[in-house]
Image (cartoon, helix red, strand yellow):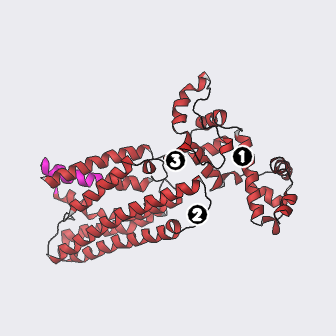
């Protein structure tokens, strides 16, 4: 009875966590399609495990067998979650979906074997454990090479955000390791005692681990929000272009924008950090003729919200902001030796200017010198 209550509470907590995380899907870097699948799958697993005992109801054996047989589909979800977390992608791609081909084939063949050749099921136990450990290894290698041991780029808020991502990845990976190890041990224990528990042996361990995960997501700001900042950073936000932003919420707003005020002000810090991440890390302004509409679509931020930000919370217009960022980008490229092998015309095009003259004028206006003089200065 106690375990059934534990499973039921875990399932309900999982549904609550899924709902909260789903609302953060658009803005939260830690959330993507595969995390939602993992949360809902875990929630249903524990919910039905608990309610089936507390409130007995019949379940068709073939239906239950179907879901148990295709359970290995969650393993590629784990790997693809980490992969998309690192790449900062929300939605699945066609290439990634190929990872589900083998688990589906495995499930179909296991379903057939249970019906027609039960003596083969023994070998599927080993294959099931192999799939789990294989994707655990892929996840570790992806995190090791592209996140955990990657050198930090700059000492600013972007680096702080990356540290939060790294810490979250470590925590979530530990949860995954504990879950998969418990499952693999259960499979081999079933083989040892010549029985099949449907992975139920010591399932309470996974339930406890899942509860820790759910509470971590629900109670920790750094987990719930895209680029969460701790209390010290909130007091003094380390934005790269802090001179451009007006962080005060006590700005005078036109009556026509009062409806937007409540929505935008609540997410202002998230918006500003997302804007800076897009222009600094993804260098989006290198694309010529980027408009406010294009930038809005790329950020997945409503255009009206961006207009509000540059109207009330920026010291420069969007056009001027874009121009300044492009010049800063060109300065960085000169610092890295771009002009040693390329021309100024090439530099202006690389920075996102459609013509050389506007680039030269802007460079002189913003830096105080022309590119050739700046190159000599740094030499």
Locate residue 195, reporting x and y percent. 14, 72
Which badge, 1 or 2, is on the more N-terminal residue? 2
Residue that numbered label 2 is attached to:
152
Q: Is residue 244 left or right of residue 9?
A: right
Secondary element at image label 2:
loop
Can you tell which mark lies on residue 270? none
**Residues in magenta, as a range:** 41-60
Q: Quadrant of the C terminus?
A: bottom right
Can you tell which mark lies on residue 232? 3
Q: CA distance from mark 1 to mark 3?
A: 30 Å
Q: Main secondary structure of the magenta part?
A: helix
Q: Is residue 266 left or right of residue 124?
A: right
Q: Residues within 10 Å of mark 2 (few under 14, many from 20)?
A: few
Can you tell which mark lies on residue 322? 1
In magenta stretch: residue 168:
no
Locate residue 202, reporting x and y percent. 20, 64
Secondary element at image label 3:
helix
């Amino acid at each position: 009875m106690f375990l059934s209550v534990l499973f039921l509470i875990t399932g309900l907590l999982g549904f609550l966590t899924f709902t909260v995380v789903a609302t953060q899907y658009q803005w939260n870097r830690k959330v993507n399609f595969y995390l939602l699948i993992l949360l809902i799958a875990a929630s249903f697993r524990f919910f039905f495990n608990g309610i089936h005992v507390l409130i007995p109801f019949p379940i068709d054996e073939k239906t239950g067998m179907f879901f148990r047989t295709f359970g290995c589909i969650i393993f590629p979800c784990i790997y693809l979650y980490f992969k998309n977390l690192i790449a900062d992608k929300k939605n699945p791609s066609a290439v990634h979906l190929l990872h589900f081909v083998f688990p589906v084939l495995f499930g179909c063949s296991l379903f057939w074997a249970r019906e027609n050749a039960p003596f083969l099921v023994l070998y599927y136990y080993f294959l099931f454990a192999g799939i789990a450990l294989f994707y655990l290894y892929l996840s570790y290698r992806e995190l090791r090479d592209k996140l955990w041991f990657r050198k930090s780029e700059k000492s600013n808020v972007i680096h702080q955000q990356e540290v939060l991502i790294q810490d979250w990845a470590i925590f979530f990976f530990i949860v995954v390791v504990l879950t998969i190890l418990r499952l693999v041990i259960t499979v081999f224990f079933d083989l040892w005692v010549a029985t099949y528990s449907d992975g139920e042996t010591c399932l309470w361990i996974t339930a406890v681990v899942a509860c820790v995960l759910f509470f971590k997501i629900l109670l920790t700001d750094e987990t719930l929000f895209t680029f969460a900042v701790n209390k010290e950073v909130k007091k003094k936000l380390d934005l790269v272009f802090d001179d451009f932003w007006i962080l005060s919420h006590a700005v005078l707003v036109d009556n026509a924008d009062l409806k937007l005020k409540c929505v935008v002000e609540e997410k202002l810090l998230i918006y500003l950090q997302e804007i800076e991440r897009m222009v600094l890390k993804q260098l989006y302004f290198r694309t010529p003729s980027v408009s406010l509409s294009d930038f809005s679509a790329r950020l997945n931020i409503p255009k009206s919200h961006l207009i509000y930000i540059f109207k009330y919370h920026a010291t420069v217009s969007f056009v001027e902001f874009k121009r300044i960022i492009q010049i800063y980008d060109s300065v960085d490229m000169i610092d890295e030796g771009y002009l040693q092998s390329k021309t100024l015309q090439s530099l202006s095009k690389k920075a996102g200017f459609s013509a050389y003259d506007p680039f030269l004028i802007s460079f002189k206006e913003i830096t105080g010198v022309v590119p050739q003089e700046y190159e000599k200065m740094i030499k």
